[in-house]
Image (cartoon, rainbow, N blue to C red):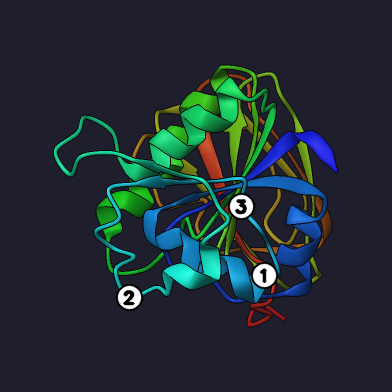
Amino acid sequence: MNESTFTILLGGPVRVTPRLEAAIAGSRVIAADGGMRHALPLGLKPELWVGDFDSSEDLSQDDFADVPRQAHPPRKNLTDGEIAIEEALSRGATRLVLVGALGGERSDQALMHLILSVTLANQGLDVHLTSGEEEAWPLLSAQPMTLDLPPASLFSVLGFSELKGLSIAGARYPLQNFELPFGSSRTISNVAEGAVTLSLASGDAVILARPYDLTGA
């Protein structure tokens, strides 16, 4: 077991895929409220279950009777997911895999997870978000990143600020030292041609990929 890698089970949709299983292998696990429903399909046993438990009332408590619970009031200043992340950090997490962080009915929470991932990465943490079908990573300035994506799979770079010095290699639409205005769609729907390398001179961004979507072929 990797003592400093934590999988955080969140409430968004999840599809079990080989890439998802590889990402969480050997990690410690904390479930946030309804995210516990992903534990059994993924073969995971969380070491802690946190939340106000308003979105897990349909789950059988007998299935998780031996998992310690940490209850919080419905009226609180943090989401159940952020509480789970704080618990992981207090237990020594240096890498976080946020499972169920993307998509679903709550667009506000999915967007918050993306923004939070940038904040956590700026604090020095390695952060990976995944639903099984989609994956995301923060891209920070002066921290180049290489992603092992299947050829013809789709990926996008979402700027959370103006981006300067953006370079993309290993893609159908490469860029070199590009300046991306905030809000521009120029970097949506690129296509991987194998390993993709990205770097940024200034600004904050998130890479959102669809490794099983080969419509770019």
Amino acid under disc 1: Leu
- Specify few, some or many for label 3: CA neighbours under 10 Å numbering under 14, 14-19, or 20 or more: many
- Specify few, some or many for label 2: CA neighbours under 10 Å numbering under 14, 14-19, or 20 or more: few
Q: What residue sits 78% from the left and 72% below the top?
A: 18
Q: Which residue matches tag 1?
A: 42
Residue 26 percent location from the top left of the image: 82, 50
Amino acid under disc 2: Asp
Residue 6 percent location from the top left of the image: 66, 41
- Specify few, some or many for label 1: CA neighbours under 10 Å numbering under 14, 14-19, or 20 or more: some
Q: Which residue matches tag 2?
A: 58
Q: What residue sits 21% from the left and 29% below the top?
A: 77
Secondary structure, mark 2, is loop
Q: Are marks 3 and 2 in contact (CB under 8 Å)?
A: no
What is the C-alpha distance between the residues marked 1 and 3?
11 Å
153 left or right of 130? Answer: right
Secondary structure, mark 1, is helix
Amino acid under disc 3: Pro
For the N terminus, the image quarter is: top right
Secondary structure, mark 3, is loop
What is the C-alpha distance between the residues marked 3 and 2?
18 Å
What is the C-alpha distance between the residues marked 1 and 2?
18 Å
Callout in the foreground (1, 3): 3
Residue closest to the eye, 55 or 98:
55
Residue 126 percent location from the top left of the image: 68, 32
Q: Which residue matches tag 3?
A: 46
